[in-house]
Image (tube, grey):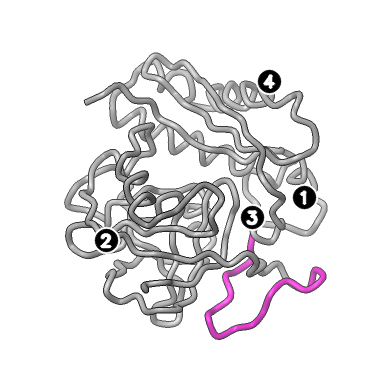
Amino acid sequence: MDDFRLFTSIRYDPGLLKVPILGFTNAGWNQDPSPFYMLDFHRDRMLRAATYWGWTAAIAAISGEKGLKNFQGYLQNITSELGGSPHRVMITLAPDGNLDHQISPLPETHLNNLYPEYLPSPVSETSAQFGESKAPIRDPTYDILLDVQKTTKSEFTHYKTTLRDMYNGARKRAGISLGDKKEVLLVNGDGHIMEGSISTPYFWRGGQWVTPPVSREFAASQGSGGNDGTTRRWARDRNLVVEQVVLSDSLVEGEKCWISNGLRGFIFGKVKLH
């Protein structure tokens, strides 16, 4: 296996500093002023991966309260000159505990899409109206495509690493270019939806939003094989969604759904099979 690092992409956004004073009461990490979206969940996910591979130095670098503070301090240092606009901060963690980063601009995102009180049902036309609720905005709308090839479940789909051929391949087969408002869903050998190439998907089943199951630690016999995303964890912790196997052949043309990730929060989508 080629050398690899763990990685995570964090939203740096000074607009998040307003979260505590704008009535968001269940924001988690950002309930206290911080420009880093769900920072603790990003650290936790990398720590679980480092623990799986037994990277002792990496574990020591980010574990516990001290490790979280060190991680936060690293982010504060590398973003100190960015100003007031949102940025993507891609962090990599090596086996020796060394952190590295890449930074690029991000578009603005409505706070309701970063911290939704709920995900509106497909039959609801409710959207955020001048602070009446904290429902997410349905603009933009992404085309949600289905990969034409199956993907094997592995520790490299369960944990987020720099080995991403399976995701890059799915995006290439779907004809997705950088900046396209499209996402492609990966499917495992059993015909179950695993995840999106850069997001967690949510589907309306039996009167509730569901997302493919993910085991806490990697086990080939458990879960659908996808990644335990930061926004996925946030939504599950707040009972916005539940875990359930989603068969790829249960998707229908035009089906309304949501996707989410740690950069853009929750995004409305429609399944496009043809």
Which of the numbered marks, if any, corresponds to residue 77?
A: 4
Confirm or deny contact between disc 4 and disc 1 (CB under 8 A): no
Q: Which residue is at 80% across, 68% downward?
A: 131
Q: Secondary structure at mark 2?
A: strand
Q: Is residue 175 above or below residue 126?
A: above
Q: Which residue is mark 1?
A: 20
Total numbered labels: 4
Q: Is residue 28 above or below residue 81?
A: below
Q: Position of residue 57 (x, y in %)?
A: 39, 15
Label 2 vs label 3, nearer the camera: 2
Label 3 vs label 1, nearer the camera: 3
168 or 40, nearer to the observer: 168
> How many residues crowd around disc 1 within 10 Å: few (fewer than 14), some, or many (20 or more)?
some
> How many residues crowd around disc 3 within 10 Å: few (fewer than 14), some, or many (20 or more)?
many
Say left or right for 40 vs 204. Answer: right
Which of the numbered marks, if any, corresponds to residue 114?
A: 3
Q: Which residue is mark 2?
A: 148
**Marks 3/4: CA–CA distance:** 24 Å
Which stretch did the figure color magenta?
114-132
